[in-house]
Amino acid sequence: MTYDYDLFVIGGGSGGIATARRAAEYGAKVGLAEVGPLGGTCVNKGCIPKKLMVYTSHFPSLFQEAEGYGWSPVKSTLDWDKMVTAVNQEVERLNGIYQRMLDNSKVELYRDYGKLLDAHTIVVGEKQITADKILIAVGGHPVRPNIPGIENTIISDQMFTLPEQPKRIVIWGGGYIGVEFACIMHGLGSDVIQVIRRDKILRGFDEDLQSLIQESMEHHGIRILKNCEITSIEQTSQGLKIALQGEQNTEMVLADTIGLAATGRKPNLENLGLEKAGVEVKNGAIAVDKYSCTSQPNIYAVGDCTDRINLTPVAINEGRAFADTEFGGKPRLMSHENVPSAVFSYPEAATVGLTEAEAKEQYGEDAIKVYRSKFRPMYYVLPGKEEKTLMKLVVHQESDRVLGAHMVGDHAAEIIQGVAIAVKMGAKKADFDATVGIHPSSAEEFVTMR
């Protein structure tokens, strides 16, 4: 049978675009449907604008720390509108780059919703298009709990277009999105209250990492209400009245009308026509095998809509592995082991491999040895700040293999990215010990721990 396309991609985020371009490089005829801005969540409503706001939030601390080095005091105020405008201009610039990349790759772009009619047919707007293979890369979206008054809150997507800076903000959720925005808004000068359902933030991360970030956030002035649920939100003339249930058993009145619900995300599966194409869904996500293939042998899915590891580089790698295998004659799998990640909190954190708890559960407590180093970096000595850095290696004693590396502190993501190569290659603690450190640096602690 003759099809309109060798590959049709539904979704123009980072994963979908990377896959489309890679397949086109191999000579495939490729089409792609995306109704929204190109680049998906990461470029438009996530990683990129958020990281730019992280940079913005660090300047007040830098101004203060400079005095310890002899610089005169700096009095500066944030122009919120200028920041938001600059951030969104950069996002628009990146949208244009993605458009040019698709054009240069000769990928045909359809600016409309795509949905499945059957295993080989996609409806895009009013057109019916056929394809030999189909890739679903539609990402995910934030969800808000169903409680009275939830409509008075915003989701993380809306943080980048607020018309003015909130003086006081309540953030509901202890995951990395909630933690990052709590630190951003505090750094920008807002009073921040974070409400979490458990006793610690960042569930699933190493416990030492959780503890140090949480202690540091509270030390800096972020109020964290633990083991709490928000039961209702009411708009009043004084602001938002938020009712809490839990250890605190209190009610709060905010001076602003802004509350951020960062309580989770789920795949964008609505109106995709998955049932018409016979694509299986499990636990609210598209079910795929190790090759990213769905229950239909010609339909694949990558990225957040499969709810494996919801990170942009993972979606890109999954998609490129699919394209290499199906169109490039270079079969390969995307490994989901030892994927590094970071939390752009203050202090920053990054991690790769197993946590201490995971390693002990997998190998047994006696089989694991943990190396830790906690110290004040040299940078903070002259400013007189008691900021702490934590570095940690989780090692399997019998093989000496480093199973996990974790860090809290300045430039954690940049440092762990390099360490991740060693962990991915199966480096042993002896390999770390044999590596000469760069002195003076914080990173050298990873090769001097005993």
Image (cartoon, rainbow, N blue to C red):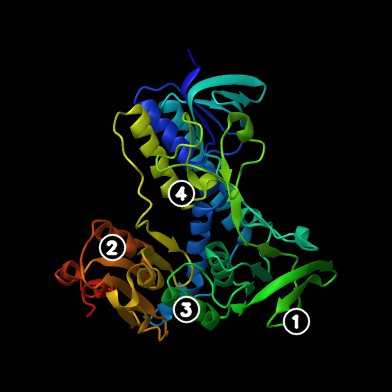
Q: How far separated are the C-alphas under marks 4 and 3?
A: 26 Å
N-terminal of the two: label 1 or label 4?
Answer: 1
Q: Which residue is mark 1?
A: 250
Q: Is residue 334 above or below residue 272?
A: below
N-terminal of the two: label 4 or label 3?
Answer: 3
Task: Determine whether, in the image, residue 156 is placed left or right of residue 109.
Answer: right
N-terminal of the two: label 1 or label 3?
Answer: 3
Is there a contact, CB below 8 Å, between mark 1 and mark 3?
A: no
Q: How far separated are the C-alphas under marks 3 and 2?
A: 22 Å
Q: Amino acid at mark 1?
A: Thr
Instruction: State the mark number for residue 211.
Output: 3
Q: Amino acid at mark 4?
A: Thr
Q: Nearer the viewer, residue 386 or 121?
A: 121
What is the x, y in percent for residue 180?
Answer: 53, 65
Q: Which residue is mark 4?
A: 312
Q: Residues within 10 Å of mark 4 (few under 14, many from 20)?
A: many
Q: How far separated are the C-alphas under marks 1 and 3?
A: 25 Å
Secondary structure type for disc 2: helix
Q: Residues within 10 Å of mark 1 (few under 14, many from 20)?
A: few
Can you name the residue that lies furthest to the right here?
A: 237
Q: Amino acid at mark 2?
A: Val
Q: Nearer the viewer, residue 62 or 435?
A: 435
Q: Is residue 109 above or below residue 398?
A: above
Task: Determine whether, in the image, residue 369 is placed left or right of residue 281.
Answer: left
Indicate the quadrant where residue 265 lies.
bottom right
Indicate the quadrant where residue 245 lies.
bottom right
Secondary structure type for disc 4: helix
Residue 441 visible: yes
Is there a contact, CB below 8 Å, between mark 3 and mark 2?
A: no
N-terminal of the two: label 3 or label 2?
Answer: 3
Image quadrant where one finds the C terminus: bottom left
